[in-house]
Image (tube, grey):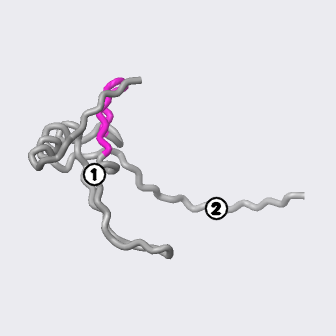
Amino acid sequence: MKHYEDRVIPERIEKRTTHLTCDLCGVKSKGYDWVCGSYEVKEVELSVTIKHRTGESYPSGGSGSTFEIDMCPKCFQEKLIPWIQSQGGNVREEEWDF
């Protein structure tokens, strides 16, 4: 036989992203990312491609810092890419479809 009792489970607060603001020009995203419409693709994966981590890592733990920036697609194309190229960087463009 199973016996039951009522238990109160406390409410928890979760922090979720509601929108982004470009750190360069101040434009706000319409949602939690830079997607503008149902069929329009404007994605910026800066947290994946532009991220610098410093610190120490051991099997038992570690600590350090991560440097990131929130940047809209327009600033990515019109500010970051030209700056990288002016510094001698090679920016590759790849066509995609599905």
- Secondary structure of the residue carrying tag 2 is loop
Q: Which residues are magenta?
A: 34-45
User: Residue 16: horizontal and vertical position, in percent?
Assistant: 41, 51
Asked if residue 92 is positioned above or below residue 7 in the image, the reply reads above
Q: Residues within 10 Å of mark 2 (few under 14, many from 20)?
A: few
Residue at left 23%, top 41%?
A: 72
- Location of the N terminus by quadrant is bottom right
Question: Would you identify the image quadrant in which residue 63 lies?
Answer: bottom left
Amino acid type, mark 1: Ile
Query: Does 40 appear in magenta?
Result: yes
- Location of the C terminus by quadrant is top left
- Decide whether the magenta segment is chiefly helix, strand or loop: loop
Looking at this view, name the residue that lies furthest to the right: 1
Disc ID at residue 50: 1
Q: Residues within 10 Å of mark 1 (few under 14, many from 20)?
A: few
Residue at left 11%, top 49%?
A: 87
Q: Nearer the viewer, residue 18 or 74?
A: 74
Amino acid type, mark 2: Val
Report, in whole angstroms, how far the alpha carbon at label 1 lies from the one at label 2. 44 Å
Residue at left 37%, top 49%?
A: 17
Question: Would you identify the image quadrant in which residue 73 lies?
Answer: top left
User: Residue 58: horizontal and vertical position, in percent?
Assistant: 45, 74
Residue at left 29%, top 32%?
A: 94
Closer to the camera: disc 1 or disc 2?
1
Looking at this view, name the residue that lies furthest to the left: 86
Residue labelled with disc 2:
8
Asked if residue 78 is positioned above or below residue 67 in the image, the reply reads above
Mark earlier in primary sequence (1, 2): 2
